[in-house]
Amino acid sequence: MAPVVSRLDALAAGSGGAIESRTLITAQHRQMLDDALRIFDIKAGADLDLMSENQSLHDLTSKILIKTSEYLIAEKPDLVLVHGDTTTTMAAALAAFYQKIRVAHVEAGLRTRDIYAPFPEEINRRVCDVIANIHFAPTETARKNLIKDGIAPEGIYVTGNTVVDALYYILKNKAIPVKSPRVQKALSENKKIILVTAHRRENFGGPFERICDAFYKIVNENPEAVIVYPVHMNPNVKNAVEGKFNEFKGAAKERIILESPMPYLEFVTLMNQAYIILTDSGGIQEEGATLSKPVLVMREDTERPEVIEAGCAILVGSDIDKIAGAVKQLIESKTAYDKMACGSKCYGNGDASVKIAAVIEKLATGIKK
């Protein structure tokens, strides 16, 4: 959302008071949020600071709904702009609906059609799309999904995805070297870096254990491979990964590097230096494809089918042999690697935020009425 915030701030500065933009944050993930605010020099108009340790979905949802409602009642905005599929997005959209405030949804229309995958994101996004008056769909597929769900076509705008805007901005202006000595050493030795991100709720438990076993299989079968895994702070992830890692034996274990979550500036650099990306994240599927990195999606389905159709990604789920086998093939076969490292512009050219801000500016007068 940062590129959109920046564009709206620029419009507000030059609009003579016709547009005023304010940023409300819930701090659903405090550390990662603060990192993003610093990078993009965003000053929040209000910070609800709602994060608590190992919070449940129902507790978080209720807190966001109540506190965001209080803010909206006090500020009386004409439009609430939300992004993606987080609990913050869904609860904020619902809070706006209760106050009969119009909602615009950035990254609207993504679907797996399985309400439990990704969980709870699939339902969060669907709820938000039902509430929203304006839908900024990243792709034509997303637009078709919205129409299939009964959304009026005239309220849908295909813009590309703002994650590409943010990625291009960082690469051009802000990216910094990875500071981890172990990662630096692996890069200096020309190891093939397998970058991992894994944190989805539907992978908690058995799937996470199998995913970790796949990492051990990868480093045992491929001496040139080094896995770098910035481990998510959620204790359901952190405790499971560290517990499993402690079970591994042998020298190959040293080529599995567990790191704390990296600042985004370093993480973008690492994505760009990685040989393969293994992820259950949504946005990283898009970033990996944009950076021409083969992406192995550790999920049974994806709401981003464009990366699969473009040949930049494949679904491997949490199956040990599928994950390890796909990595082995990409390391051993240049033909297989080149076919997936094709790069894709299916999520836009980095101007999604410009398109979104232009639509909001054009609609501003109508929204006021």
Image: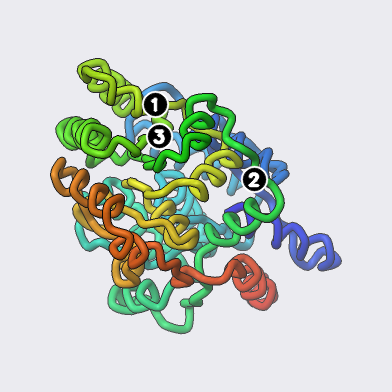
Q: Which amino acid, mark 1?
A: Leu
The answer to whether residue 30 is seen in the rendering is no
Q: Which residue is mark 1?
A: 258
Q: Position of residue 94 (x, y in %)?
A: 43, 52
Asked whether residue 179 appears in the rendered view, the answer is: yes
Q: Of callouts 3 and 1, which one flags the residue occurring earlier in the amino acid sequence?
A: 3
- The residue under label 3 is 228
- Few, some or many residues within 10 Å of mark 1 (<14, 14–19, 20+): some
Crowding at mark 2 (Cα within 10 Å: few <14, some 14-19, many 20+)? some
Determine the CA span between mark 2 and mark 3. 18 Å
Residue 137 appears in which quarter of the rendering? Answer: bottom left
What residue sits 40% from the left and 43% below the top? 192
Going by the numbered disc 2, the residue's amino acid type is Ala
- Judge by depth and name the residue closer to the eye, 252 or 234: 252
Q: CA distance from mark 2 to mark 1?
A: 21 Å
Task: Name the residue that disc number 2 marks.
Answer: 175
Question: Quadrant location of the C terminus?
Answer: bottom right
Image location (x, y in percent) of residue 368: 67, 70
